[in-house]
Image (cartoon, rainbow, N blue to C red):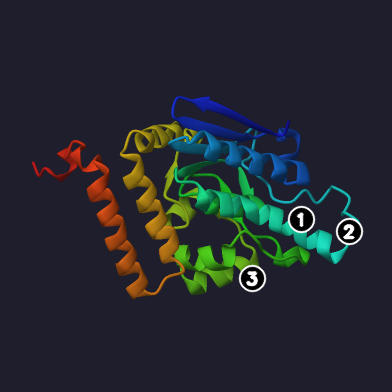
Amino acid sequence: MVVHYERDGAVARIVLDRPERLNAVTAELTDGLVAALRRALAEEVRAVVLSGNGRAFCAGHDLKEEPPVETVLQTRARLEAIQDVTRLVRELPAPVVAAVHGYALGAGCEFALACDVVVATEDAAFGFPEVGVGLSVTGGISRLLPHLVGWARAKELLLLGERISGAEAARIGMVARAVPPGEHETVALDLARQLADRPPLAVSLAKQVLDQGLDATFGEALAREVDHAVLTSLSGEGEAPRTEFVRG
């Protein structure tokens, strides 16, 4: 078992567990992560925390593994399995919070940035080394990264493969927040519990409207917002306490 799944009330915790290899990606780890996300979907959890055991979140593809001998179709299937992580994170109604420390490189960075909220330690290391080793990014990063950091910075990060710290990642908008070393899982779990306590339909629709807005025209975004507003008005969740609207 290189991916562990456990429940903490309404929150699911998914942990990458190849600490001896800095949770580097293998087919087994990808399959385990996909299975865990599908379990969270089936169990209708209210929030998910994704983290890594040991000294890193995920150091990317395990380049010490022997390259697989496979056909072009098998290569495509393997890469699409990695992309299933991003697809499932977007499919989940519940928000996914990444708790990142140590390395988040290559596919590991892609796993993190696919999540809805990323909490990183200030000394975490994010980067995309693929170009430097003759590989290419997957996981929807060609679409996600420019939206997070802007076109010019995204090109610089991908083409040069430079690593940036969690503090810098937060400064440029790549991640939601940076925290002192050792506090990432505590903060991520606290955020997940806060999200799990909020009206579930409203949370799910807020996640969807932003995700789908990546691929929408402005007119489509306006129409979707009205659709969601109608759904929330009919759901009964509008009777939730409205203290957040009170101005002191």
Q: Give the label, 3 or 1, closer to the camera.
A: 1
Query: In percent of the image, x 51 and y 32: which residue is there?
Result: 12
The single residue placed furthest to the right in the displayed view is: 69
Vertical comparison of 83 with 18: above or below: below
Q: Is residue 82 visible?
A: yes
Give residue 78's mark.
1
Q: Is residue 15 left or right of residue 219?
A: right
- Proximity of marks 1 and 2: CB atoms separated by less than 8 Å: yes
The N terminus sits in image quarter = top right
For badge 2, the amino acid type reads Glu
Spatial CA span between label 1 and label 2:
10 Å
**Label for residue 159?**
3
Q: Residue at x 33, y 33 (%)?
A: 197
**Measured Cα–Cα span from mark 2 to mark 3:** 27 Å
**Which of 188 and 168 lies nearest the eye of the viewer?**
188
Q: Earlier in the sequence, mark 3 or mark 1?
A: 1
Q: Given the image, on which type of amino acid does mark 1 rest?
A: Arg
Residue 2 is situated, as x and y percent measured from the top left of the image, at 72, 34
State the SS at label 1.
helix
Label 3: few (<14), some (14–19) or many (≥20) C-alpha neighbours in 10 Å: some
Regarding residue 105, the answer to whether it shows in the image is no
Q: Which residue is mark 2?
A: 70
Labels 3 & 1 near each other (Cβ < 8 A): no
